[in-house]
Image: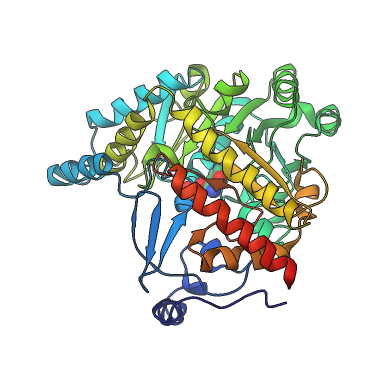
Amino acid sequence: QNVSNEQVGEKSAAAFARAKEAMPGGVNSPVRAFRAVGGTPPFIARGNGAYLYDIDGRRYIDYLLSWGPLIAGHAHPLVVEAVTKQAQRGTSFGAPTEIETELAEEIKRAYPSMELVRMVNSGTEATMSALRLARGYTGRSRVVKFTGCYHGHADSFLIRAGSGVATFGLPDSPGVPSAMAELTLTVPYNDIDHLRMVFEQYGEEIAAVIIEPVAGNMGLVLPQGGFLQAVRELTRAYETVLIFDEVMTGFRVSYGGAQERFGIDPDLTTLGKVIGGGMPVGAYGGKREIMELVAPDGPIYQAGTLSGNPLAMAAGLATLKLLQTEGTYERLEAVAKRVSTGFVEAGMRAGFSVQAHAIGAMFGNFFAAEPIVDYESAKQANVQLYSAYFHEMLSRGIYFAPSQLEAGFVSLAHTDLQVDETLEAMDDVMQELRRR
Ligand code: PMP
C-alpha cells in the first residue's frame, strides 16, 4: 500500500525542497510538514471562502481553516476591510487603544466567567500565562493535565500532549527539564475516578487543572456526561484553579464556548484562534480576584510588545460580529454533522470500521472499531488507512487535517453544495481504498 501517495504539484514540491534549506523541516510549525501522513504539503497561494488554492493552481475545499481560526472562511470581505482600515491608521503603538477594550468587552459578554481579560499573541502564551497565574494565586506548584490534550508548547504542557506531539509520539520533549515535567500530573480524559485518586494523593499541592472541555488535539473527543461537572466539583473542593483551555472551542462549539454549552463556570479561561480572525492572538481571563494579581495591578508578571495588536483586534472583532447572526451555530453544527455522518456512512458502505464526532463547528473522523473517549482509544485508530484516505481526498480537492488525531473545522463559508461534493468524494475514496 502506497501510503505517502505523492501527488503534490511540481511547484509545491520545489517550494518544499527550498523551504527545507531555510527552516527546520521546511515549516514554522511541525504539523504543516505532513509527517503523520507522509508526502509533501501543497504550498498555499491564497484562500477565499471555503477554498484554499495552492501555488500549482489546485483548489481545495478547506476543512482545516488554519487549524481553527478561520470560522468566517478565508479572506472574508468584512474581516479584510477591518484589517485594511486599521493598517492605514497604523499597525502597532505599544500604547493603549480602544479597540483592545472593545474586544475584551465582547469576550466578557460572551464568557461571564471572564471578569477581566488579558490579550496575548498565541494560545501558547495564554495557557502559559494562565498557569503562572494559577501557581502565583494558590502558592502551589503542581498542575494536572489530561493525556492527549494539547495546551501549546510551554514546558509544563509538553507532557503526554496531543496534536503534533501525539502524532510524532514524543512522550515529552527533550529540553523540558525533568524538574519541570515532574510537576505535571497526567490523567486520562473522561476518567474522573483517576482524577479523584490524583487529588487524594496530591490535592493540597495542585495549583491548577487545565482541560480542553471538548478535546480537539487527539481528534475530536467529547466529554462524557457529567465529566466536566465532576472536574469542577473536585477542583472546587480542593481550591484548585480550574482552567478551561478554550483556544480551539472558544466561539466554535458555541458563541460562549464549551463553558456555555455545558454550563460550567471555570476560574480561568484561555482563548485564541477565532478571537483573532486569522491574526496572531490569544487571551486569558477569569475571576477578578485571580486576574487582579496580574501586573501591573498585581505581582504576577506577564507582558508583550505586540499584545492587543490593533490589526488582530480588528480581525477578531469583525469575525465575532459575523458570528452574532441568529442561527449561526445551528447552521455550523449542521454542516459539521453532515461531514461526520457522511464519513461514517461512506466508511460503512465500504466495510471499514469508522467512528465520528461533531459538535458546533468541529468534527472528528477516525478509522477505528471502538468508541473513542480518550487518548488510548484515539491511538487505536488506523494510521495507514487514514493516510491513504487523506491523500486520496486531497487529490480530489478536499483538504482535511493531515492526521486523524486532529480535529476538522467548518466555517460560515461552507455551502451545502461543497459538502455534497465532499461526501461524494468520500464515498468514491472509501470504495477505492476497499479495492486496494
Ligand atoms: N490550546 C489548545 C486547546 C490548542 O488547540 C492550541 C493550538 N492548537 C493551543 C493551546 C496553542 O495555541 P497556539 O498554537 O496559538 O500557540
Residue 297 shown left or right of residue 170 in the figure: left
Q: Is residue 350 visible?
A: yes
Judging depth in this view, the residue of 6 and 210 nearest the camera is: 6
Judging depth in this view, the residue of 242 and 83 nearest the camera is: 83
Residue 339 shown left or right of residue 78 in the figure: right
Q: Is residue 401 visible?
A: no
Which residue corresponds to the image point at 68% horizontal and 56% vertical from the top-left?
166
Coloration of the structure image: rainbow
Say above or below: 292 vs 435: above
Residue 100 shown left or right of residue 288 in the figure: left
Q: Position of residue 200 (x, y in %)?
A: 85, 27
Quadrant in which the N terminus appears: bottom right
Which residue corresponds to the image point at 70% horizontal and 32% vertical from the top-left?
223
| Rendered image quadrant of residue 390 | bottom right
Judging depth in this view, the residue of 76 and 213 nearest the camera is: 76
Q: Position of residue 191 (x, y in %)?
A: 81, 34
Which residue corresponds to the image point at 56% horizontal and 37% vertical from the top-left?
132
Q: Position of residue 184 (x, y in %)?
A: 71, 43
